[in-house]
Image (cartoon, rainbow, N blue to C red):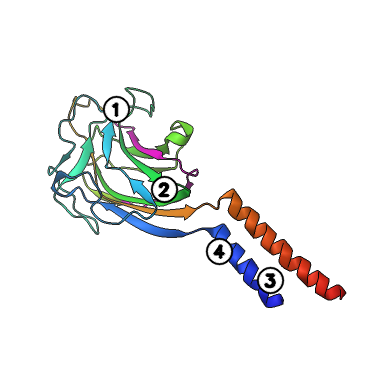
Amino acid sequence: MKKTLIAVLSLTAVSLAGVNGQVVINYAFTNNSTSPTSGSPLNFAISDFTIGNSFGTVSAPANSSSTSSGYSGATGGSNFGNAFRTGALNTGSSGSGFFEFTITPSTGYTFQLSQFDFGVRSTSTGAQTLSLRSNLDSYGADIFTSVVANTGAWSAKTNSFTFNSQTDAAVTFRLFGYGGTGSASSGTINTRIDDVSLTITATAVPEPSTWALIGLGSAFVLWRMRRKAVI
């Protein structure tokens, strides 16, 4: 009977943990593509990268100007840029520029975003701080921030953290850029990113009926053990 109880408790632990798998999604912006370059989403979908709140019109955010170099894993070739306003962070409309992507868990799943690595280059008027935020709190709080040198040189940024989504809820992330100085030129890219790497884990959430069956099964085994002890 003890073996039976252990088996039931083990199945309970597996059920509560759900089905999950960690996936690394990479964006190298090869041939000016903003879609993932490698990595296969498992129980979630992920969008292309886009830009927003540009200072002026950026007609070709993905291009092969100022190719990435100088850090391990730099792929060169195309990268992805935006024209950022100078000054303090402003997450409102016509405020600080951003890079954007969306992760959508499959039905009955949540996801965890735990790593966001990338190469970055800023000119003198470009972003000196990058802040990742999400629509879950209307972009109100930093998930992480990363300081960027405005020297025009590429550098690699590694960011580890824990962000958990809600069940079935798509999350839009924005990497805001701010802190630049001087007079930025309208429509001119002054901050670029490349070699983006995202670590994502999707986890199944047990249905209420599953919780009920787990509870009933555990209760039955305990009842049998107590009954046997009395006899």
Instruction: Give the CA separation, mark 1 to mark 4.
Output: 44 Å
Disc 3 marks a residue whose amino acid type is Leu
Disc 1 marks a residue whose amino acid type is Asn
Q: Mark 3 or mark 2, which has the lower sequence index?
A: 3
Disc 4 marks a residue whose amino acid type is Val
Measured as percent of width and height from the top left, residue 19 is found at: 48, 59
- List the residue tagged with mark 1: 53
Q: Secondary structure at mark 4?
A: helix
Measured as percent of width and height from the top left, residue 83 is found at: 23, 31
Density class for disc 2 (Cα within 10 Å; few <14, some 14-19, many ≥20) is some
Queried whether the magenta region covers residue 120, the answer comes back as no
- List the residue tagged with mark 3: 5
Queried whether the magenta region covers residue 174, the answer comes back as yes
- Which span of residues is magenta-colored? 157-181
Foreground tag (1 vs 3) = 3
Q: Mark 1 or mark 4, which has the lower sequence index?
A: 4
- List the residue tagged with mark 4: 14
